[in-house]
Image: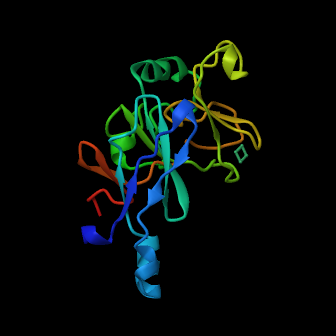
Amino acid sequence: MDSSRRTLLVATSAAGGVAAVATAVPFVASLTPSERAKAAGAPVEVDISQLAPGEMMTVEWRGKPVWILRRTPEMLATLEVTESRVSDPDSREPMQPEYARNKYRSIKPEYLVVVGICTHLGCSPTDKFRPGVESGLGADWPGGFLCPCHGSFFDLSARVYRSMPAPTNLEVPPHMYLTETTLLVGEDGKA
Ligand code: FES
């Protein structure tokens, strides 16, 4: 992959846990139609150096929103609590590459990289990171995501709770780390 053709994205601060869409360097306008088509399916290089613990950013890959959540130790601890509430705790369903078949569903536990599209009918779930009554989802809510369309709950590894309309966990796209703070979404060097 010619790295000069990758779309470079820069993390935008997501204050208060609200997801922010990263801004793409506008090189696409200068491309021919076939180059543009190629760029649309190309991997996306993302600078995650500005993403603080507890924050989430959104980037676009192949027209889909991809969330990158930097989980705090407290957020990671909730995965023990939700283990018994989710339908596929070890992520055995083929919704992720091999390296995400674990309870963190990630390469590095700190970072969750997931497609932000509900596996039921394609709505975009909402982040509900605050635990407890403040979430409006009950005192025992540990934090996670809620798809408002038909009420599917997901934990902070985007694992779906049992008996929800959504049949599977959210999809983890192929990805890899180019450096400690640069992520490549859409390619993992395995193909
Ligand atoms: S689209 Fe998410 S629950 Fe139906």
Among the 4 quarters of the image, the one containing residue 161: top right
Q: Quadrant of the N terminus?
A: bottom left
Vertical arrangement, residue 16 with respect to residue 170, above or below: above
Check the image and tell me how it is coloured.
rainbow
> Residue at the spot x=41%, y=77% of the render?
38
Number of numbered discs on residues:
0
Among the 4 quarters of the image, the one containing residue 18: top right
Vertical arrangement, residue 20 with respect to residue 81, above or below: below
- Most extreme residue toward the top is 139
Which percent across, then down, holds residue 178?
24, 52
Q: Is residue 165 left or right of residue 30?
A: right
Query: Could you tell me if residue 170 is visible in this image?
Result: no
Q: Is residue 54 left or right of residue 137?
A: left
Viewer-proximal residue among 90 and 68: 68
Vertical arrangement, residue 33 with respect to residue 122, above or below: below
Q: Quadrant of the C terminus?
A: bottom left
Which percent across, then down, holds residue 117?
60, 50
Taking the image in four quarters, ligand 1 sits in the one at top right
